[in-house]
């Protein structure tokens, strides 16, 4: 129990020291201060016999590119990323923190020495702790550490006549101490066998070569290549067995590459909110596993299609038609991605970019498939045939002659989406030639009934993003009003009153006015209060079921949401804006 407490306390202290030093902007090139004055009676550290004993952790040579401090300087702190640090004899530093490298101390460190992903080698004096996370700790001959020595998933070696003022702990590694070493605390070795785990050397190499270099693959780490090879085999199996879904994703990548990436990014951003909504509903907890399974399958199919797409695009670029074959294109794309994964920093960026792109292609292919499977939109209803009665005079004779022709069908004016109502006295274009002579000789004309086309068929339907934009503006407005009115408890009532009232009054909302949108009924009748209220309640239900009622617009042929289908309405986009008030 005490060992666990010591490890946690030392680890937390080391991390806090590293973060504090990093935030204090004392990084590597900290300003030099005057040489530290040695107090009378203090030991002369420059005379320390820092003999580096050969053995488990001997590092006589410094790696190329390591940061070496000058002689006789007094530094505030050293915080380094991605390379080694050497504090020479006679040097003094407040603390030494290294990420992705090793720290070698010949001089004096007032506080702690922390190496994350590297080794902590002490041959001088450290005032507090010496900690290595995913690395080893070594104390040379006559080295001094004021507090604990801890190696987390690494080894500890303490050479002859070294002194430690606290505990010595090795977690997941080996501990080697000289017989004449002075250790005031306890000595604890918690091997990896205590956790049922093998040696942590593989993890150290991975952190050093992949994590700190920001790349998924590294030639020095063999086990990641085994995992990547298994993924390649999985993708190949998917490409062969599930040919239709993969080809659908490839088609989306070919036709709409930018849109697929945007859809993938939107899916990533909306996923946390969807999961929170599922948790909030209680019953949605049982849906979450299926959501994750669907996302994983979509990511696998999308990544397979993306590898094939990269190979085909490369073949088109170099004019090699053989790369248009799916399997060959897949292998070429996998080789390209593998090479990019090994590049530091760029490899991690490519991993994230391809993941989003692959997911977007799968989601977009799913929406396209649902849209294709949806039933065809019914044809616009045709108005009743117009009956023309025989009139007296020349006009009546002309019409009678026209109607008496053998095989003549009843005169039915054509109905077009943009056709405007006929004014009284206006002659339909279909019979204008036959009536032209008679119209010149008589004032008695044909008086056809007015033909009014419903607005639902006059104007184009509003798309998904138009309606989402208008809804966003309305939600902001309702939120402001509810905040002024007294809090979120009244939000739902205010929203229902706002939407039902605006739809009844103007057949649109403030957001719809700004984006030229209007709610109309399919039967051409005006939107009554009852219709508007039921539509508002239906919209609330569409929100409760994870906005599925609104998302339905994206793949519905009639561009209708659930609350549109409930009351027989559609949202059309007008050619020009309409004012809120007509004075």
Image (spheres, rainbow, N blue to C red):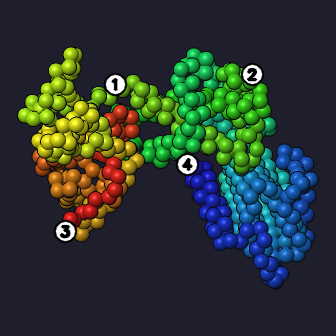
**Label located before the other in sequence (2 or 4):** 4
Q: Nearer the viewer, residue 61 or 342?
A: 342
Residue 317 placement (x, y as % from top left): 74, 34
State how far apart marks 1 and 3 are (Cα). 45 Å
Circles 2 and 4, Cβ within 8 Å, touching? The answer is no
Q: Residue furthest left?
A: 392
Image point (89%, 61%), residue name: 50
Q: Which mark is residue 322?
A: 2
Q: Quick one: SS at disc 4? A: loop
Q: In the rendered view of the protein, which quadrant contains the C terminus? A: bottom left
Which circle, 3 or 2, is nearer the viewer? Answer: 3
**Label located before the other in sequence (4 or 1):** 4
**Label located before the other in sequence (3 or 2):** 2
State how far apart marks 3 and 2 are (Cα). 70 Å
Q: Which mark is residue 583?
A: 3
Image point (29%, 28%), residue name: 379
What residue sits right under mark 4 in the picture? Answer: 1
Image point (50%, 42%), residue name: 263
Residue 228 placement (x, y as % from top left): 68, 30
Q: Nearer the viewer, residue 371 or 330?
A: 371
Horizontal placement of 347 versus 124: left or right? left
Q: Vertical placement of 238 versus 26: above or below?
A: above
Circles 1 and 2, Cβ within 8 Å, touching? The answer is no
| Quadrant in the picture for residue 91 | bottom right
State how far apart marks 1 and 2 are (Cα). 39 Å
**Label located before the other in sequence (1 or 3):** 1
């Amino acid at each position: 129990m005490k060992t666990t407490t010591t490890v946690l306390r030392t680890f937390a202290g080391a991390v806090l020291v590293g973060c504090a030093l990093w935030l204090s902007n004392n990084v590597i090139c900290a300003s030099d201060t005057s040489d530290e004055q040695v107090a009378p009676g203090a030991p002369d550290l420059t005379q320390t016999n820092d003999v580096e004993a050969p053995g488990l952790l001997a590092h006589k040579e410094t790696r190329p590119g390591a940061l070496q401090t000058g002689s006789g300087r007094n530094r505030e702190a050293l915080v380094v990323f991605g390379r080694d640090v050497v504090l020479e004899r006679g040097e003094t530093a407040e603390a030494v923190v290294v990420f992705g490298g090793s720290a070698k101390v010949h001089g004096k460190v007032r506080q702690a020495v922390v190496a994350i992903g590297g080794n902590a080698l002490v041959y001088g004096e450290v005032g507090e702790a010496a900690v290595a996370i995913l690395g080893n700790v070594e104390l040379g001959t006559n080295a001094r550490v004021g507090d604990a020595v801890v190696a987390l998933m690494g080894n500890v070696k303490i050479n002859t006549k070294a002194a430690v003022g606290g505990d010595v702990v090795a977690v997941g590694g080996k501990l080697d101490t000289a017989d004449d070493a002075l250790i005031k605390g306890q000595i604890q070795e918690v091997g990896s066998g205590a956790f049922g785990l093998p040696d942590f050397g593989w993890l150290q190499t991975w952190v050093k070569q992949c994590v700190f270099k920001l790349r998924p693959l590294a030639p020095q780490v063999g086990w990641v290549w085994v995992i990547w090879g298994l993924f390649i085999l999985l993708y190949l199996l998917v490409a062969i067995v599930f040919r239709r879904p993969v080809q659908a994703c490839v088609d989306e990548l070919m036709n709409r590459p930018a849109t697929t990436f945007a859809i993938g990014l939107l899916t990533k951003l909306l996923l946390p909110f969807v999961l929170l909504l599922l948790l909030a509903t209680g019953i949605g907890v049982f849906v979450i596993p299926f959501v994750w399974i669907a996302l994983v399958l979509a990511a696998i199919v999308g990544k397979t299609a993306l590898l094939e797409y990269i190979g085909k695009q490369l073949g088109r670029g170099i004019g090699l038609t053989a790369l248009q074959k799916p399997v060959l294109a897949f292998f070429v794309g996998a080789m390209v991605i593998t090479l990019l994964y090994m590049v530091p920093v760029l490899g991690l960026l490519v991993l994230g970019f391809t993941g989003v792109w692959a997911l977007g292609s799968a989601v977009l292919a799913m929406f396209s498939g649902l849209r294709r499977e949806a039933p065809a939109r019914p044809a616009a209803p045709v108005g009743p045939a117009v009956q023309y009665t025989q009139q007296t005079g020349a006009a009546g004779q002309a019409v009678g002659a026209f109607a008496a022709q053998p095989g003549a069908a009843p005169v039915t004016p054509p109905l077009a989406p943009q056709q405007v109502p006929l004014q009284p006295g206006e002659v339909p274009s279909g019979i204008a030639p036959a009536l032209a002579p008679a119209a010149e000789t008589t004032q008695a004309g044909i008086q056809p009934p007015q033909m009014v086309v419903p607005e639902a068929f006059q104007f184009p339907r509003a798309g998904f993003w138009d309606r989402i934009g208008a809804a966003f503006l309305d939600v902001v407005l309702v939120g402001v009003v509810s905040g002024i009115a007294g809090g979120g408890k009244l939000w739902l009532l205010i929203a229902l009153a706002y939407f039902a009232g605006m739809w009844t009054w103007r057949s649109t909302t403030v957001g719809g006015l700004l984006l030229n949108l209007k709610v109309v009924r399919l039967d051409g009748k005006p939107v009554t209060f009852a219709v508007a209220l039921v539509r508002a309640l239906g919209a609330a239900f569409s929100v409760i079921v994870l906005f599925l009622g609104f998302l339905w617009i994206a793949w519905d042929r009639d561009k209708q949401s659930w609350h549109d289908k409930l009351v027989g309405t559609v949202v059309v986009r007008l050619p020009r804006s309409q004012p809120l008030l007509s004075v």
